[in-house]
Image (cartoon, rainbow, N blue to C red):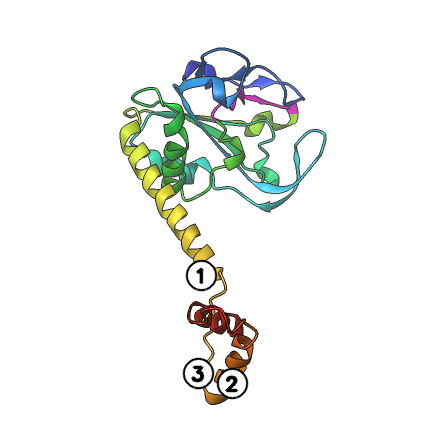
Amino acid sequence: MVDLHSQHTIREEKSGPMLGGYALNVGHRSDVYVSSRSIIQLDIDSKGEKDGGTGRLLKVTRSAPSIDVTGPLIGDFEWIANSTHWHEPGIGAIKYRISILPDRDILPDEHKPVLEALDEQLGGCLDRDAWPLSQAFYAPSCPAHAAQDAFIAHNTGRPLPVDVFVARGRQILAAREQLSAQSVANASPQPVRIPETPENIRIVEGMLAAIPASGDRGPWRDVVWSTAC
């Protein structure tokens, strides 16, 4: 893992060799064919207006935290961080990737929980667009004019405990689902009961009068009153 991320290639275009970090059962690169991931890769990117052709940030609206900020938050684990192609701190474009060694392969249904737990630990700064299970990442590179700002940072530590992070991530997802369901319930219109005043009773009686006298009006009362509400 360290060897694959320890040197930048100088090239003007972002496109180049890619690293997967996962095992495919059969077929082409797609989430459904990934059987496991052996490396955790996290993108941390500033946000803003991009050049549509190159992806280079032209105007930064939100700068990402630097590796000096995020690195200590996962300092117990072994990781290597490398600046990504359009890392230009001079304009506030902070862009880098952290690759973490897990203590075992991560199964497909564990991948998102692990990322959720890491995002929480890192303060919510991860780029979720890079979360697909089959996501591949470009090997470290930079254009010539930005080579002086390119960096590699390696932290020695223990492998990340997958079971612990899966458990925490599933707690986060379950809590978010519960909160979402509660928000929907709170947003649903609640019926307003009209008080049974003499005037309202006369209105309901008029509605009941439309029901044939030959029928049993008992079951209709609640329905008619609900309609009146």
Q: Earlier in the sequence, mark 1 or mark 2?
A: 1
Q: Is residue 6 visible?
A: no
- 49 vs 149, left or right, is right
**Marks 1 and 2 in Cβ contact (< 8 Å):** no
Q: Nearer the viewer, residue 71 or 213?
A: 213
Sort mark 1 into few (<14), some (14-19) or many (20+) by Cα contacts within 10 Å. few
**Cα–Cα span, label 1 and label 3:** 26 Å
- Residue 61 location (% of width, % of height): 61, 47
Q: Residue at x 45, y 69 (%)?
A: 216
- Residue range of the region highlighted in magenta in the rendering: 133-144
Q: Label 2 amino acid?
A: Arg
SS state under label 2: helix
Placement of 13 over or under 131, stated as above or below: above
Placement of 221 over or under 47, stated as above or below: below
**Marks 2 and 3 in Cβ contact (< 8 Å):** no
Residue extending farthest bottom: 198
- Residue 115 location (% of width, % of height): 40, 34
- Residue 141 location (% of width, % of height): 57, 21
- Residue 108 location (% of width, % of height): 40, 24
Q: How many marks?
A: 3
